[in-house]
Amino acid sequence: MTENHLRSDGRTPDQLREVRITRGWSAHAEGSVLIEFGGTRVLCTASFEETVPRWLKGRGSGWVTAEYAMLPRATGSRSPRESVKGKIGGRTHEISRLVGRALRAAVDTQALGENMITLDCDVLQADGGTRTAAITGAYVALADAIEWARRQGHVARSAKVLTSSVAAISVGILPDGTPVLDLPYTEDSTAETDMNVVATGEGDFVEIQGTAEGAAFGRGELDRLLDLALQGTSELTEHQRRALAEELPTTSGRS
Amino acid sequence: MTENHLRSDGRTPDQLREVRITRGWSAHAEGSVLIEFGGTRVLCTASFEETVPRWLKGRGSGWVTAEYAMLPRATGSRSPRESVKGKIGGRTHEISRLVGRALRAAVDTQALGENMITLDCDVLQADGGTRTAAITGAYVALADAIEWARRQGHVARSAKVLTSSVAAISVGILPDGTPVLDLPYTEDSTAETDMNVVATGEGDFVEIQGTAEGAAFGRGELDRLLDLALQGTSELTEHQRRALAEELPTTSGRS
Amino acid sequence: MTENHLRSDGRTPDQLREVRITRGWSAHAEGSVLIEFGGTRVLCTASFEETVPRWLKGRGSGWVTAEYAMLPRATGSRSPRESVKGKIGGRTHEISRLVGRALRAAVDTQALGENMITLDCDVLQADGGTRTAAITGAYVALADAIEWARRQGHVARSAKVLTSSVAAISVGILPDGTPVLDLPYTEDSTAETDMNVVATGEGDFVEIQGTAEGAAFGRGELDRLLDLALQGTSELTEHQRRALAEELPTTSGRS
Amino acid sequence: MTENHLRSDGRTPDQLREVRITRGWSAHAEGSVLIEFGGTRVLCTASFEETVPRWLKGRGSGWVTAEYAMLPRATGSRSPRESVKGKIGGRTHEISRLVGRALRAAVDTQALGENMITLDCDVLQADGGTRTAAITGAYVALADAIEWARRQGHVARSAKVLTSSVAAISVGILPDGTPVLDLPYTEDSTAETDMNVVATGEGDFVEIQGTAEGAAFGRGELDRLLDLALQGTSELTEHQRRALAEELPTTSGRS
Amino acid sequence: MTENHLRSDGRTPDQLREVRITRGWSAHAEGSVLIEFGGTRVLCTASFEETVPRWLKGRGSGWVTAEYAMLPRATGSRSPRESVKGKIGGRTHEISRLVGRALRAAVDTQALGENMITLDCDVLQADGGTRTAAITGAYVALADAIEWARRQGHVARSAKVLTSSVAAISVGILPDGTPVLDLPYTEDSTAETDMNVVATGEGDFVEIQGTAEGAAFGRGELDRLLDLALQGTSELTEHQRRALAEELPTTSGRS
Amino acid sequence: MTENHLRSDGRTPDQLREVRITRGWSAHAEGSVLIEFGGTRVLCTASFEETVPRWLKGRGSGWVTAEYAMLPRATGSRSPRESVKGKIGGRTHEISRLVGRALRAAVDTQALGENMITLDCDVLQADGGTRTAAITGAYVALADAIEWARRQGHVARSAKVLTSSVAAISVGILPDGTPVLDLPYTEDSTAETDMNVVATGEGDFVEIQGTAEGAAFGRGELDRLLDLALQGTSELTEHQRRALAEELPTTSGRS
């Protein structure tokens, strides 16, 4: 890996794709974000409900959960709808669970009270890294929904519901051995190793999922990937911070 | 119904909401359109495949089909995902079939050859009239997919695949007896009568679905609703024509 | 269309098939009717329950719903059972919803009190027009179930639960351009346009569903079809009236 | 058990309910029978197809299978549809398999050639003994379908496809210890022991299914039940023989 | 059948395979048994819960139910998992119901109180007779779970919950006409007649299920099969008695 | 973490539970292993089939896949069967995919030829670490199945199908901050961080899945967990090596 190694899209190995975060994209949801990592485009909505799942009732604690899905033609060739097939595939199940765990790591469910927030992450267009974009965008939608609940009086003004921010990014090792950050589909489909890292705004790990797609990887490669990933989540944290600092458009969201 | 009757959103009874048609919204599909009827926003993609359903194989004829769905938080309160419930609801089934029938009415399946086009209409945001927006937008995506197939040589340059255009609109009778065009959710949920009309660019009927939600309606009321609907589809036809006359953005769509 | 145009089964264009309505066909249901439109034979049962769906509880209002289905060999070739396939098809879903809506148009659900009536329409033999026979027969079964509930004291003697009668018929345009009433399977499968009309006993429309199977149809054709349909529902209303005027066989139904 | 013991419906312990077998009840099926055992009413259709299940292809042998189901309001209170629930219940599964095994015992599948006959037994009205009525009626429908296939040339004129007849009946022990034949619902729901027996026209056993609902039963009781059952199937065999000896109505069935 | 007739595995016609009953096989369940009939190996666990199904609530009575299943590679070739297929097959349904009925015949559900015991019978290795091994083993697991409940005070010390023991065995007629006891897979797959008998420790019948796989069978054959079966269940009762007489290993089961 | 820190079961932080690997546990499968990590007991069978999934046909390459499941009473309280619920849960889906990926990392699918091996990992008793026991045991069953295929001539004698061994272990951080190896259920349910590591016999990583259940974890904690994990997989590799060095019992497995 050298400074002058360039990728097919012209980025350096440690460079993120262009990140765009559009808050208030949807008129109905308590929080909604269209997040783009280059050609990957995910609509994240946060739905606030004054209820909790049955197994949590009466405990004074809330819940955060997530569902991830792809539109059938988000990808290069059309996939059958899971609703039509009548069941959810393993990949969908796995990513939904990952997104939910990641976001719960940012929340003090006691401070949330007996309320539930559901994060729907629908991939409108896919070009690699959809789960990491989903987590990064869902955090912003979550923050907006919590702020909405505060304004509505569903959550105490003083309650510190968000305990940290979370962001996620993919890293991988290209066939030529170069470790790279934020893989688009063409890189992802040929990478030797593929890793998704969720980290807090403080740079601690929430989740690490690394898989050797080709050859197994050694401790040194792992260390370089983790360095790249933490650099990436740090930049994404800054994107989230800036997005949340802006005023939410008054015509968008439930205000 | 008088000229000076105004609706809650300030429109006259015979006025469409603002219509926006954005072609090439999606990078992967052979045709893709984001269509907006006011606050209703539907992503329509057309997927072209060089195959046909099994029951059509070897007959030299193609097929056009459609699937309609709503994102869980497209509406004011969140609906459970049909993929998670493991089955498609009656309303989804019904609208998917309607969209497919409507689009097939525009196509000469012999001229299409043994190819199949699937129209996915996903409601990103709902404010009444989602099925009519879906049909109107899907027609434009279909036209782009057929043009793509022609450029790729999958369909003969001379083949007249599209035999007409189709567009659709809702009409209804408000509780005060006023017949109105293009109902948003607030009007739709209280209307006495609700009708969806699909018509060709020449003003002939492809489909009429009228339902008395409250009192049954007489022949005179029906006639006034049909007048309004044909005026609406005529305007939508013009919107479609203008959208298709523009150059497709070169960075969008499979080119 | 001329007076002397005859159809394959010898009827004139505006002639219904033989209609037979057998009340009290089933020993258990609160209302039950075997209705026949020529070779189409539908068993309609009305089940009265002193309950309402959860979303209606405590509102003092009742509910009427319907389920339509076909026996696997009701048709010329055997269809797989939907119970074995594990899901209901789009057509079944669509017709069940249509029958339910049509019957609810005849009922004052407030007058019904917190009670629920389920109309099961099972096609024992199909020869076109099964959904219209289902609606027409279900109305009679519904009337019997309401009368049963009145006798049992579940519904007040003075309550006017039925606000009108409903009947339904199909109309269509044959390939030679002739508009015809009450199409059997052979006509239905080749008709250019196919329309189902539900109307009250007073001749107002409850539902209109018209589809161009071949060429789109103009306003003039539509008008002729509506004329035919209203003539047909008017005759069916008379059949219903006569059937309900007879004494219910004492050995049938829950008495 | 004494000669003068009478049951609630006035029958002697060894007396069948009135048996009615109506052939050609359905216009489309290759064989169709409405069979009635008192208030139990089952429509049995036999569908002949020139195909076999995949696992039998190319072996020169045919297949006979069955599906049993109940209409939702065949019983005293309405049961949810299995198609709507999205799965078949254990009881339905079990009886479908029983009917299929029983009918296959009557058939030489080699003589049938590579053809398949599906027996659909739909209970239109239930009053106990629905599975035994289904088997007894399905045999007659099967015989008609095989005769139809012979006339059409799908099966060789000389082929002896039916090797015997089969009929079925229920027997049981009432709470007072009386063994009885052909139990209606009221007896069936309180019987100590419940047994269904399928036998050939020659009086040999095809299937015996006996269950102690209350106390376990001894060898002596078993013997008395088997005596009663064989007397019952012998009478049913005679009913089948007489029904098949009549001319099939020319307007019914596929002729 | 003669004394010197030997079967492929060297047994005489009236000889059981080696029976092994290992109590306390599982650490968590209130009762658990690994039962082996030769190469057939079934893990039976009894789960005690202080609840009853909804339809039994408030009646002071308990419930016993069972679920039977096979591991995918319990058999010679792998079968698809029913959980992956998304539905339970007819055979599984049927056997689960049989096991439940058989065990309920051993229990006084009033004496059990408002408690529920679920018997899970999972076939780890199959070589014929899996349902009879399941019933025979489940009885022992049930007895241990009831004893556990007694020690815990969930069931009164004086309550006579078990009213008898139950055991089950298969019998059949080989192609050469020999009636045999306890058929392994190779015999079972070629037998002319196949019968499963469930009997109490006193030798009364709880369930008889006999099927003619080939030719129908006469009364004499039936009698010889019943003789063999009762001899077999009598020996199994003795195996159960001996197993339950031993001390339960203290490290196993919930103690 | 100090040498003298002991866990509730008396182990040191870096100590595995007792590992037992029983080869040839099942009579039918081409490879079968009962693996135990303390109280966790998983039956792993490898089924060899001379076929490949449809999407691989004709490419000269094989496939390895896995399915993981738990018996309903493998755990402290009974879980409903996924086959009865009609769908597989997210956790099952996720682990099945993990096991499949892990084992494929050990195989050269080209050398396997157009053959498929399915690894079924059924948890008979659960006490934490079921997925890691499944992977470790499945590797041994896989090796036996490949050896079987070699003896049968389905795979070339010279083909190097296994390119390395794989083993897996869990590590975690206890609430007091101690990093520990191989967590039983009681530790797993309270751990702050939970990580599963799959590694090759050479000590390279195949998969890392780490989740912060409580507080996020830093780079230093991650490093200590990875050290522990690699020590654990190294010991498991030795267990696998020793197990495979023994002679397979001749009465077990398909030989």
Image: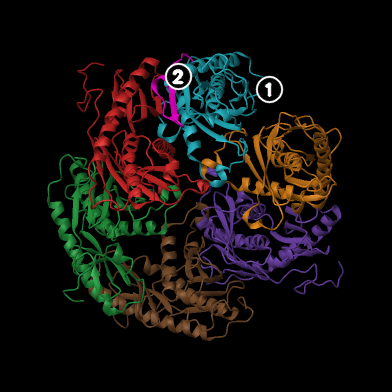
Chain colours: A cyan, B orange, C purple, D brown, E green, F red
The disc labelled 1 sits on which kind of residue? Thr
Residue D74 appears at what percent x and percent y?
50, 64
Frontmost residue, B88 versus E62: B88
**N-term mark: 2 or 1:** 2
Provide the secondary structure element on which disc 2 rests.
helix
Q: In this view, does B242 lie above or below D64?
A: above
Q: In which quarter of the image is the C terminus of chain B?
A: top right
Q: Evaluate whether residue D81 shows in this view.
A: no
Chain letter for mark 2? A
Binning the other alpha carbons within 10 Å of mark 1 as few (below 14), some (14 to 19) or many (20 upward) gives few
Farthest residue to the front: give it: F158
Residue A157 appears at what percent x and percent y?
51, 15
Q: What stretch is highlighted in magenta?
A: A200-221
Q: In this view, does E215 lie to the left or right of C81?
A: left
Q: Evaluate whether residue B126 shows in this view.
A: yes
Q: In which quarter of the image is the N terminus of chain B?
A: top right
Q: Is residue C174 left or right of residue E244?
A: right
Q: Is residue D149 above or below residue B247?
A: below
Residue for badge 2: A226
Marks counted in the figure total: 2
Residue F92 appears at what percent x and percent y?
41, 39
Residue for badge 1: A251
Q: Does the magenta stretch include residue A203?
A: yes
Q: In this view, does D16 lie above or below D128?
A: below
Question: Which residue is found at the position 62% from the left and 20% from the top?
Answer: A10
